[in-house]
Amino acid sequence: MNRKTLAEHVLAVMRLRYPNPKPHLNAASPWQLLAATMLSAQCTDARVNAVTPSFFARWPGPEESARARLGELEEAIRSTGFFRMKARSILLAAQRIMNAYGGQVPHSLAELVTLPGVGRKTANVVLWGAFGINEGLAVDTHVARISWRLGLTDAREADKIEQDLLALFPPAEWGNLNHRMVSFGRDVCRARTPGCELCELLAACPRRGVDKSRKNR
C-alpha cells in the first residue's frame, strides 16, 4: 500500500473511531488556548487542565498576564514542569501581544511563531482551536509516534513529519486529524504498550518500533 492510499485509509478509520473530535485542553479564549498549549510542553493535558482554572481566574487574558509578577506565575504553574521557562515565555508572549498586536492573539502562523515560547506545533493548535484555521498540522508526541509506526513518514523531526503529513492529508482535515491522532495515541497506539489487538489499522501497519513478540495489553 503506497503512502497516499495508506493516508486515505488512516483518515477513514480515524473519522469512524472519533466522529466528533474535541480539543484536549480547556480554554475559553484564544489567549487561554495559547497559554494552555505552552504549558502542555512535557506535561500531560490532564495536569494542565487541573492548573489552568485557578491560573485563568487570576490572569484571564494577555493584559493581566503581561502585568503579572514572574515569581507568582512560576508558583502557579510549578506542577506542570519546566515552570520557570514556561512562566517567562507566557509573560513575554503576553507583553508582545499587548505591545505588537493590540491585545489580540494573532491568527497567522508567521505572527504566532514570533511570540516567545511559541513554535509551529503550538501555533497550529491555536490556529485551529481558536480560529478554525488550517495552516499546518500540529505534530506532538502522539502524532509523531503514530505516523512513524504506520510508515506515513520516515522522519523523526517534528517539522519534517509535518511536511510529510501535509502532503498526504487534505488541508481541511489537518486540525481534526491532530485531535483524532492524540486520542488514538492515548486509547490504542500507546508508546510502551500499544493495543495492536484493538487497532483497526493493524492489517496495514508495519508496526515499526513495536516489539511484536510481546503480548499486547
Image (cartoon, rainbow, N blue to C red):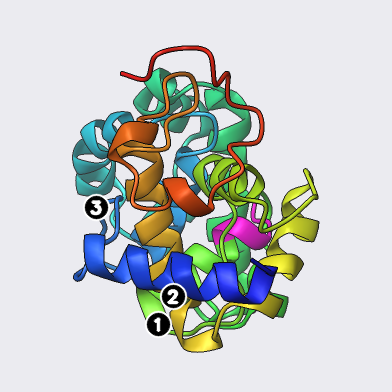
Does residue 121 belong to the magenta stretch? yes
Residue behind mark 2: 128
Residue behind mark 3: 26
Does residue 136 belong to the magenta stretch? no
Give the class, few, some or many, for how many residues have Cα within 10 Å of label 2's Cα (few <14, many ≥20). Answer: many
Q: Image quarter for residue 19? A: bottom left
**Are discs 1 and 2 less than 8 Å apart at CB?**
yes
Q: Amino acid at mark 1?
A: Phe
CA gap, disc 1 and disc 2: 6 Å
Q: Which residues are magenta?
A: 118-122
Q: Secondary structure at mark 1?
A: helix
Residue behind mark 1: 131
Q: Secondary structure at mark 2?
A: helix
* Residue 18 visible in rendering: no
Residue ID at (45%, 39%): 40
Q: Amino acid at mark 3?
A: Asn
Residue ID at (19%, 70%): 20
User: Does residue 141 appear left or right of residue 178 in this picture?
Assistant: right
Question: At which x and y percent is residue 67?
Answer: 46, 50
